[in-house]
Amino acid sequence: MKISEWSFLLSASLLLASLPLTVCALAETPNPAEDPVERELREEWGFECGTPYVEAAQASAQAKSRRTSRKAQPPRVFPEWEPADAPLSSSAGWESELRTLLAQGRRDKTASPEFLDALERVLNRHAGESAPSAAPSSKLPFKPTFKGPGMPPGWNAIKPEVWEFGDGQARQVFSQANTCYILSYEPGKDWKDYELRLRFESEKWFTPPMSSAARVYVRYKGMDGGYCVNWNGGGALDISNCQADGKGPILASRELSPEIIKDGLEWRVRVHGDEITVWHAGKRMLLLRDDTHKSGTIGLESSHIPMTFSNVEVQ
């Protein structure tokens, strides 16, 4: 082999031997655009970018950054506040005082909304426990006040938690199809001949083929049944011989305009002897003759729709 060939091989060997050093030097040169987490994992642990380990580490670092950012935020500051003296009667209990305090707190924004909401939930759970209740009356005429917030004296519901009271209204705030949440007045169980007057309204009437209805019960005896007057939002009025769990076989019915059922005007249901008559705006809408039930109280309910009952009166 000639000297020139040996020189070429030696030069080539020296060049190849220097390549790893050059690559390492390039690899160790930090990339200013590279994510710090990626660089640390690559340099310390040998993980390549895009692996699940790197993605998990990036998510963890971002979550830590968010926590740090939240901790750095200053706490909310509420003004110094002195609640006004509540004009309460001598019979008012702790519940009335706390509700007055809650109303003032919301008005003046003196506490966080989360705290005020929690306080209101506690008050609603214990509604009516502190205020002394007047003895319920079985005499007629009878006109419930529905002052709220708890269950009025003498009233009972199959599912009390779906009912709210206030401003002269009884509101069934939750309902499903084929359920029974009847609200009834216990002292009226011996009433015989009387007239029930009321209004009912809802903003969520279903349209056919879905069914929603307002219902009142007369001569209602709970487990012993009674009569159910049913206003279907699709445009039907009927009277049924209700069973222990609610509406039963229909005894009389007629078609009505859905607008009449939903107009919010007064309805009257009169029971006298063997006659059950339903009136609206001075017109008789339905008549049933049946003597199955001789006496019983009144009841309110809605089916598959929230409902507000107001101007309830029994004469």
Image (cartoon, rainbow, N blue to C red):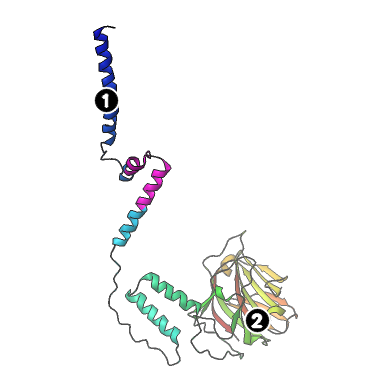
Which residue is painted at 28% across and 75% down in the image? 79
Which percent across, then down, holds residue 280?
60, 75
Q: Where is residue 40 in the image (x, y as percent from the top left)?
A: 32, 44
Q: Which residues, given as a range, are shown in magenta?
A: 40-62
Question: How far from the left and from the top, in percent, is residue 112?
Answer: 35, 71
Residue 15 in sight here: yes
Q: How crowded is mark 2: few (under 14 residues within 10 Å), some or many (20 or more)?
A: many
Of labels 2 and 1, earlier in sequence is 1
| Residue at 41 percent of width and 82 percent of height | 98
Which of the labelled discs sits on residue 83, or is there none?
Answer: none
Q: Is residue 120 left or right of residue 193?
A: left
Between residue 259 and residue 227, name the one nearer to us: 227
Measuring 67% from the left and 78% from the top, which residue is drawn there? 277
- Kind of residue at badge 1: Ser
Tell me: 263 left or right of 224.
Answer: left
Residue 283 visible in the current orientation: no
Q: In which quarter of the image is residue 292?
A: bottom right
- Snapshot quadrant of residue 226: bottom right
What kind of residue is marked 2? Arg
Q: Does the magenta stretch include residue 240?
A: no
Q: Residue sitting at 53 percent across and 65 percent down?
A: 204
Q: Name the residue under label 2.
A: 270
Q: Is residue 148 left or right of residue 37?
A: right
Q: Could you tell me which secondary element the residue under label 2 belongs to?
A: strand
User: SS class of the residue under badge 1?
Assistant: helix
**Which dot marks residue 18?**
1
**In the depicted view, which residue is nearer to us: 80 or 256?**
80
In this rendering, the label closer to the viewer, 2 or 1: 1
Residue 213 place in picture, x, y as percent: 61, 68
Few, some or many residues within 10 Å of mark 1 (<14, 14–19, 20+): few
